[in-house]
Image (cartoon, coloured by chain):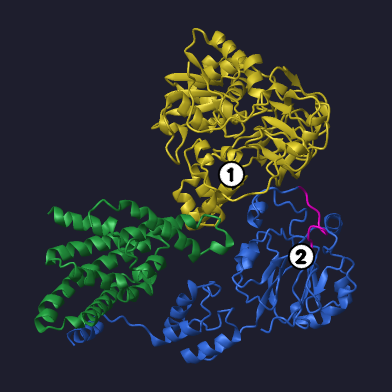
Amino acid sequence: MKLRTFKGGIHPPDNKQWTSHKAIEDCPLPDELVVPLSQHIGAPSVVCVEVGQHVAKGQEVGSAKGFVSVPVHASTSGEVVAIESRPHPFGASLPAVVIKPDGEDSWSYNLQFTDPGSLTSDEVIEKVRQAGVVGMGGAAFPAHVKMSPPPEKPIRTLLFNGVECEPYLTSDHRMMLEESERVLQGIALLQYVYGAERVVIGVEANKPDAIALLKEQCAGASIEILPLEVKYPQGAEKQLIVAATGREVPSGGLPMDVGAAVHNVSTAAAVTDAVMLGRPLIERVCTVTGPAIKEPKNLRVRIGMPLSHLVEVCGGLVEEPGKIILGGPMMGFTQVGFDTPVIRGSSGLLLLREEDVAKSPEGPCIRCARCVQACPMNLLPTTIAAYARRDLVAETEEYCAMDCIECGSCSYVCPARIPLVQSIRYGKAALLAKKRNALL
Amino acid sequence: MTAAIALGIAAKKFAVEVDPRELAAMEVLPGVNCGACGFPGCAGYAKALVAGKIEPNLCPPGGAELVTKLARILGVEAVVMARQTAVVLCQGDNRKAQLRFRYLGLEDCNAAQRIAGGSKACPGGCIGLASCLRACPFDAIEITADGLAVINRERCTGCRKCVAVCPRNVIRMTPYESSIHVMCNSHDKGAAVRKYCQVGCIGCHICNKTVPDAYKVEDFLATVVYERDAEAVEAIVKCPTRCIRDFNEGYPEGSTFLPLKNDKSDAA
Amino acid sequence: MSDLLVILVSAIFVNNFVLARFLGICPFLGVSKKVETALGMGMAVTFVMTVATVVTWFVQYFILIPFGIEYLQTIAFILVIASLVQLVEMVIQKVSPVLYQSLGIFLPLITTNCAVLGLAVLNIQKDYTFLEGIVFAIGAALGFTLALVLFAGLRERLELCTVPQSFRGTAIALVTAGLLSLAFMGFAGLVKG
């Protein structure tokens, strides 16, 4: 039976064999946790504790600023030793709350079990917001904002992303296998809020065990388990919508414009914790993998754990890494060192050896159009990149640069090794700057 | 005959008034369309000159000569602005300054700056990927073999395009007459600067103590007080990191430019 | 009717003024950097060519032949075309200063442009009637515009290419023009003669 998919895309080797069979392990607490105030799309949180204050596990240390923002919480109990700028995974140094764990790991309040049936839709959304739930697939968009679409855009199809198309990463896979109950409970809660006609969990065909398990557990419920062709970036929300519903999100639009909403399966599990147990989002599963780490693992880590600690827990390095990536190899953030912390969207830590890093110099574009064939958004990466590099901003807009999802498929296939995504990003930044200046 | 008459009539009917002074101004302007005057190209400046009370000394590439010519055309008095030249206030090339990581991407300073603030450990130093070189319409900038941008003081016309494009703001406009500069752009404390650069300013105040009027130190970075440029020369040998340079003696290491007194090639 | 259609198609494609007859190369290379300016130039040329045909036709058959001074054809035609273009230039400067700026020096170049003179002379040579002459002029102008716009589109794309140092600028433009001519040779045989 032919599996559903989208046009374009690439087939990088999936390299999931390092960790796909390994059960999730708990990561012990480090000596210091650095909780950044900006871990999500939207306004950074505003700090609401002081140096020297004792905080409990799950206590709010930064409050949300505005609607598109979430609070951040202490990942364990301990003392706030500093509130200062610390290296952040995005490259700059940003304000963070530094906590020294006291070893007690005690929650801030007695966690009450709440029967979800007793809550209204708005109360569910508020609990999700208070818990700081953001998209766990990597984008870290505040979930409560997504759950509040305007009334003129009803959601008819609710999609769950169990695709995990990034090579090397297996955290969502293990979540579906080991914590399917939490995931399905979260799906039920979200369906309660959205009231969609159709609920689908998309899973790539390279995870047959997860597909089988979910099908078994959903037998009888009106949840569709949709196996999808193994292709990158099937897990990107617009591509998932195309594969599952056949509808394309219009240029410059959002999934709600075609009546769809997409959430990651781990986000669904986090929603369960937030609503039913009152627990904020302070931990996640992170796949530590790659040829340069001694013992690749799927670790359950707390937000704020330094990457050096994760490396230690996984047996240390095989050799000096050529590249340290927080996330997957396609869209992850390259890190300058190991002193940055894990944040809410960190789905993986990838350590590559020197020999795994591509270093070929850039060649001229020969218009082979491989990038055009690979682009999942039907754009012309070579043209946009060429205009961006010549600072011709108006032309980049004409060629829909803003629709680029920066998936990296074009850079991956380019035989001339042209840094296409970097050029397009540069063009998008110039375009946004021009628009901002025009408004001033 | 008929055609000639017809043309004559048409010429009168469809005439568009063009001030002859504007045409004269267009002739003397350099025609480079660099925009330093703030108008859209030389045509724009010519139009503005003739239209209003715009000064005739807004064109840096034209220099003092142009100002005199324009003043004559417009029938106004000429006031010549002091010549300015751009300087890259950094000597930290790849051998003298440390890199935090290896950058493998677009060879452009603005693109590199967006990747975790650029690969140079020093937050103010020259990145060396030639964005300024490409922006300069007068070929006055070169990048040394070790990745440092250097600007030729004679060829620079002061159009400021390099200043605009540099993401580190390490290029400054300085008076042409002043040849001594503190070649550093980092406001970090001395200990930090020492760690990542051999020739950075550590804010030790020695220059300031030697010649108090010629140097001022703010936020751990010294700058020459250009009005007192003549006295500043004393402190050059006293500087412990050798970060003060007199361009009359020579350009930074690795540069192919020669100071005016040694330069026999450029007969400009 | 079909005769007129044949003349039209022949003038636009088969015997394209720029790419097959190689007339009017100057504005072809000079104004073809952007598609908008190329289109503007094409329209100006259409106007000049059509009006020029009308006037020269009258001049030939009502002044030159009756007075037996066919040998003054070249001078007379040039005079007519020159004054016509001056007129067009003045009108454009008044009506659309933007177009005037972007066409710049190329407006007067339509005057010394062999394409317009060639058109006038060819009309006479081929013994076209008044109507045939007009259709021929329109076809020629359309063909000129087509070649110009196509070439402008190609040059806009060339802007993005990494051209070898020795080919940059006019050299690669000329090579491209040659290739475009070759392509148009494919139309040969579409129309007899």
Q: Residue at x 47, y 31 (%)?
A: A7
Near-viewer residue (A171 or B267): B267
Q: Which residues are magenta?
A: B91-101
Chain C: its colour in the image is green
Q: Is residue B248 above or below residue A395?
A: below
Q: Is residue A144 inside the magenta stretch?
A: no
Where residue C35 sits: x, y (%)?
Answer: 38, 59
Identify the residue at image location x=65%, y=81%.
Answer: B83
Name the residue beneath numbered marker 2. B90
Label 2: element kind: loop
Mark 2 chain: B
Q: Given this view, does label 1 or label 2 mark the residue nearer the observer?
A: 1
Instruction: Say what amino acid the circle numbered 2 marks.
Output: Cys
Q: In terms of depth relative to the viewer, which is nearer, B180 or B5?
A: B5
Q: Residues within 10 Å of mark 1 (few under 14, many from 20)?
A: many
Q: Colour of chain B?
A: blue
Q: Closer to the camera, A65 or B64?
A: B64
Q: Could you tell me what secondary structure mostly forms the magenta stretch?
A: loop
Q: Quadrant of residue B122?
A: bottom right
Lateral position of residue A125 relative to residue C85, left or right: right
Residue kind at label 1, given as amino acid type: Val
